[in-house]
Amino acid sequence: MKMRLVLFIGIVLTAIALIGCSGGTDDAGGKVKVPEGATEVVMWNLFGGGDADFMQEIVDEYNASQEEIFINNVQQEFEEYYTKLITSVSAGKGPDLAVSHTNVLPELVSQGLVQELDTYGTEVGLDWEDFNQNILESTVFDGEHFAVPIDTHPHIFFVNNQLVGDAGLLNEDGSVKMEQTPEGFVEFLTTLKEELPEGKFPMAFSTAGVDSYRLWFSFYSQLGGENIVTDDLDNPEYVLDVEKAIEAANYMHDLWHKYEVIPLNLADFYADFQSGNAATISTGVWATGTWEATEDLDFSAMPAPNIFGQDSAFGNSHTFVIPTNQDADPEVQKGAIEFMDYATDKGVNWAEAGHIPAKTSIVESEEYAELPYRSDYAEVANYVNFPDQTIHARGIQDILIRNLDLIWTDEASPEEAFDLIENEVKALIGE
């Protein structure tokens, strides 16, 4: 408990300095012209690139659709976002509405920095049943809703149709010829290795870092591994299934080192797929828009192959939250929830970025079905395995990434790496 208090105080002091250096004021929304008679709702978001554009489009449409509420959408720097959000809310200077990833929600809930949404949600008419229940469950704590999920963005699989087709691995309907078993996935990549032209390779992927961790977590989950620690907000227990964790790690290690179907240490594996040098890539759904905008790239999108028997994939979600404010205007907070409902109804707009909308009615709509590629992986939302609901989720991920990298680079055996992981995670959670 003392260590957590020290860390929190450190974060507060750091962020106060950041706010001071950036010229922050008591106004979390900065200077903006609010239409006369409208109630201003200041929203902070962490989006960049295409995501930022799509969210601004939704905000603009909402502001134009009515005159009572005005959403002041403030884009923050991603690197500083959570530090600034936590400290600003603690100091009573936070926004009225904010965006949070699912894996950060436990920290915000535990520290009392976001409020439950059921009371005002009922008044506004928000229907929780309209959300994909697997996605929604990751935002519920002790039976209360603390966030409105916007989407889920899992890791999936992309295929270069030209290269895979020329290798004889596409069916007539365009689906991939692959037996979804551990042996079948290796055979698929090995055939590509044998059949591809010189200079082309079977799969573009990172040898180290967060992407490798996400694929390992997908395989671990497909093997039946559900958690790293228990879903206890403040006091979880270490419950990693070491046997399954090692099996998944060994399998991935062999893709680089035994079968040599993934080149080691690619400088930019996105560029390798985008330029047509790689036949496949495993990454998040957010890449869909990038590939669409790439001239002459003929590709397909599909769920990550279920090679170990259980449908599962790593994923996270963007959500809307209402930061805690003792002096908040109820009309502002109800206006914030009304916007949440509106924005999630605009899931087709948001899906253009590649994300899977959180509302089932959107995913099942004709408008969504008309979007290319998205329906091909929409089912993944039903079986995404989200990070454990604990305040330590981000710290645990950092520990896993750092030590899994030792396996991929042949600096440690899986057994050695998971011994290190166990010791570090238990030290983090105080077990």
Image (tube, rainbow, N blue to C red):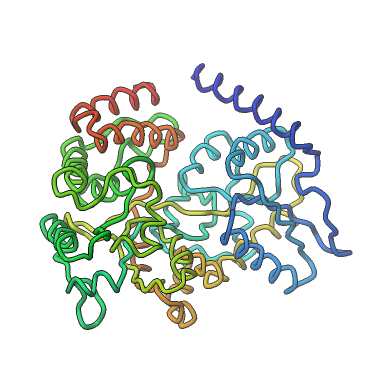
Give the total of numbered labels.
0
In the rendered image, residue 138, in percent from the top left (x then y), is placed at 43, 50
Q: Is residue 298 above or below residue 70?
A: below
User: Considering depth in this image, is 418 or 271 the residue closer to the camera?
Assistant: 271
Residue at the image position 42 percent from the left and 64 percent from the top: 132
Residue at the image position 18 percent from the left and 43 percent from the top: 257
User: Considering depth in this image, is 208 or 304 the residue closer to the camera?
Assistant: 208
Q: Is residue 164 above or below residue 48?
A: below
Q: Quadrant of residue 396?
A: top left
User: Considering depth in this image, is 86 or 57 the residue closer to the camera?
Assistant: 57
Lateral position of residue 263 relative to residue 7, left or right: left
Q: Is residue 60 above or below residue 221?
A: below
In the rendered image, residue 323, in percent from the top left (x then y), is placed at 64, 44
Residue furthest to the top in view is 2
In the rendered image, residue 423, in percent from the top left (x then y), is placed at 30, 22
Residue at the image position 17 percent from the left and 71 percent from the top: 177
Q: Quadrant of residue 270?
A: bottom left
User: Considering depth in this image, is 358 or 272 the residue closer to the camera?
Assistant: 272
In the rendered image, residue 22, in percent from the top left (x then y), is placed at 74, 37
Lateral position of residue 368 relative to residue 225, left or right: right
Residue at the image position 16 percent from the left and 62 percent from the top: 188
Residue furthest to the right in view is 36
**Position of the C terminus by quadrant:** top left
Q: Is residue 227 above or below residue 383?
A: above
Q: Quadrant of residue 195?
A: bottom left
